[in-house]
Every structure is written in C-alpha cells, then in structure tokens.
C-alpha cells in the first residue's frame, strides 16, 4: 500500500490562525456591546425592532464566540485517539451556526408579521441613534472578518452572522428615520422579510456544504469518472477500483483507491508509479492526501465504487 502526504509547516499558517482568533474575539466583543446598547435603546424607545435586533446580536455574539473557540480547537495537533486532528470541529460549528441562523430568521419573520398587522408607536429618534451606533460597530466587526471569510466554513458562517447584523441595523436605521419623519410603520417589517430571505439563501449554502462534508460525500467539484480515466491512461495501470473521495474540511480532499497493475512490479518500481499518481492527482484534481493500495490480479471485484 502506498501513502501520499504533503506536510507544510510554516510560521505563516500559525500567524494566520492567530490573526483569525484575534479578529473573531474582537467581533465577539463588539457584538456583545451592541447587544447591551440595543437592549437599553429598545426599552427606552419602545422599539420592538431594536429589541429583536438585540436578540439577533446576542445569538450572533454566541455564534462568533463559538467560531473563536472551535478555531482554536481545530489548531490542536492530532493524537493517537484523534488521528485526523480536530479540523472537523470547524464543520460541526458551521452546521450549528447555519441551523441557528435559520431558527433566528424564522423567529424574525414571525415577529415581523405580527408588527405588520399590529404596528406600535415608538420613539423614532432614539431608535435611529441606537441603530446607527450598532451599525458602526457591525461595520467594524465585518471589516475585521471580511478578509478571513473564505478561510473555512466556520469563519464564513460567523461572517454571515455579522452581515445579517449589519443589514438588520441598516433596516432599523431606515425604519427609525421613516418612522420619525413620515410615521410609515410597515416599512420596517417589509425590509426585515427581504433581509431574512437573503440570509436564508446564504445560510443554505453553508448548511449544504457542511452536510456533504460530514456525510463524507464525494466533493461536488471532483469528477470521479474523469479521475478514473486519467489514472488509467498511465501505462502501468490496468484498472482502479474501490474508490473513495471525501473532504476532511471545506478545503482538504482525501482520496483512496485500489490500483490493479498491468504486471507484477517490484516494490521499488511501484514507488516510482506512486509518485506519478500523486503528481497527477495533485496537478489535475488538487488532491494532496492519498492512500493507494497496489494489486496484481488479486481482487475479483473491479467496480469503481465498492
């Protein structure tokens, strides 16, 4: 059996992880401050929109802090009990964050519907001032996470939480201004519905990706039939079968298969074949981690999927 591994040890990845942790921790602090300010502002102005936004921010404070915790956990080294390390924790947290966002959106839709049917008088000036403070803080938090949002699903989920907060704050600011000047109370819940639908669309992508990774499904971007044909063009290979491909995280593909060789090669010769296979998988399919089992006329079942 042959194993292909690429290991990268550099200070830059450690610095990147520390930067991500600092940004997540700062975003957590900002969201906690926004929550406290909006609760006070909502009570003073009698604005349910502000109180709802405060609840949204509170849940997002927990979500971003969870992202911070799981990001630190995922940096731990593998152990004899957890040989793949703790990277999968990021995917679990991303799934939890996504489900939380869906629940929050449903709650916001219900409350927005009630406000649409039964509008209540509120102090538009206080509502607007507090919402502007929240908006500024959200912009700062989003700015810190924006460069890191494609790092992994977990950080992306936290980023989307903050985007939802920012859009929510914009809605409350617009609603406060309109209510203060024109007393049009129905605009706030209508905009809330629009923003909620946007958040649900983005959240669905995260939940879908996390689900496929946890299911150890073949990555959607990987065509196994094309991969099989590419490997079988190598002159030493008769057939590949018992193929498995999955993602450990949202960016790391693992691949394993049985390879039936055309003749009974020496062990030293199979090592050279392995290098050719690894180069092909890396260059054409972006696969770095492989487990290859060489065979010669010893496996009766030659189907690709076993």
Image (spheres, rainbow, N blue to C red):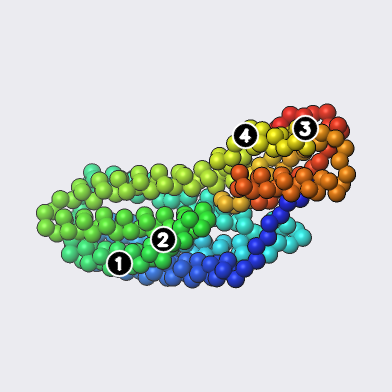
Mark 3 vs 4: CB contact within 8 A = no
Does residue 117 appear in the picture of this structure? Answer: yes
Give how far across and how far down residue 53 sits, in percent: 33, 58
Q: CA distance from mark 3 to mark 1?
A: 63 Å
Residue that carries the numbered disc 2 in the rendered image: 146
Q: Earlier in the sequence, mark 4 or mark 2?
A: 2
Q: Nearer the viewer, mark 2 or mark 1?
A: 2
Vertical order, 67 against 103 (above or below): below
SS of the residue at dot 3? strand
Q: In the figure, residue 13 lies in which quadrant?
A: bottom right
The mark that comes first in sequence, 2 or 1, is: 1
The residue identified by callout 4 is 226
Cα–Cα gap, marks 1 and 4: 49 Å
Judge by depth and name the residue closer to the eye, 205 or 104: 205
Q: CA distance from mark 2 to mark 1?
A: 15 Å
Residue 223 falls left or right of residue 64: right
Q: Which comes sooner in the sequence, label 1 or label 4?
A: 1
Q: Nearer the viewer, mark 3 or mark 2?
A: 3
Question: Where's residue 115, x and y in %?
Answer: 25, 48
Residue 38 visible in the displayed image: no
Of 288 and 306, the residue lying toward us = 288
Q: Residues within 10 Å of mark 4 (few under 14, many from 20)?
A: few
Say which label, 3 or 4, has the lower sequence index: 4
Mark 3 closeness class: few <14, some 14–19, many ≥20 residues within 10 Å: some
- Report helix, strand or loop for mark 2: helix
Label whose residue precedes the other's in the sequence (3 or 2): 2
- Which residue corresponds to mark 1? 136
Residue 86 vertical placement versus 10 (above, below) = above
What numbered label is drawn on residue 238? 3
The residue lying at 27 percent from left, 57 percent from top is 170
Asked whether the residues under the numbered discs 3 and 1 touch, taking CB atoms below 8 Å apart as contact, a structural biologist would say: no
Image x and y of residue 134, in percent: 31, 65
């Amino acid at each position: 059996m042959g194993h292909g591994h690429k290991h990268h040890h550099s200070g830059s990845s450690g610095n990147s992880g520390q930067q991500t942790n600092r940004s997540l921790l700062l975003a957590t602090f900002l969201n906690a401050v926004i929550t406290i300010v909006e609760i006070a502002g909502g009570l003073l102005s009698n604005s349910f929109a502000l109180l709802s936004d405060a609840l949204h921010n509170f849940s997002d404070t927990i979500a971003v802090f969870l992202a911070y915790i799981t990001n630190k956990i995922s940096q731990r080294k593998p152990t004899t009990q957890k040989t793949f390390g703790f990277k999968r924790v990021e995917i679990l947290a991303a799934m939890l964050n996504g489900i939380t966002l869906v629940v929050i959106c449903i709650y916001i839709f219900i409350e927005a519907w009630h406000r649409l049917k039964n509008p209540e008088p509120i102090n538009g000036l206080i509502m607007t001032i507090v919402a502007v403070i929240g908006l500024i803080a959200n912009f700062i938090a989003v700015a810190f996470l924006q460069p890191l949002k494609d790092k992994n699903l977990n950080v992306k989920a936290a980023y989307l939480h903050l985007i939802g907060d920012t859009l929510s704050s914009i809605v409350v600011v617009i609603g406060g201004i309109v209510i203060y000047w024109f007393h049009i109370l129905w605009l706030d819940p209508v905009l809330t519905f629009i923003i909620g639908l946007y958040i649900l669309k983005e959240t669905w992508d995260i939940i879908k990706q996390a689900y496929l990774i946890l299911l150890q499904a073949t990555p959607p971007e990987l065509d196994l039939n094309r991969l099989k044909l590419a490997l079988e063009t190598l002159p030493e290979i008769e057939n590949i079968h018992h193929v498995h491909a999955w993602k450990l995280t949202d960016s790391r593909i693992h691949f394993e298969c049985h390879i039936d060789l055309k003749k009974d090669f020496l062990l030293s010769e199979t090592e050279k074949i392995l290098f050719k296979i690894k180069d092909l998988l890396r260059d054409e399919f972006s696969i770095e981690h492989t487990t290859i089992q060489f065979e010669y006329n010893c496996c009766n079942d030659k189907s690709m999927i076993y």
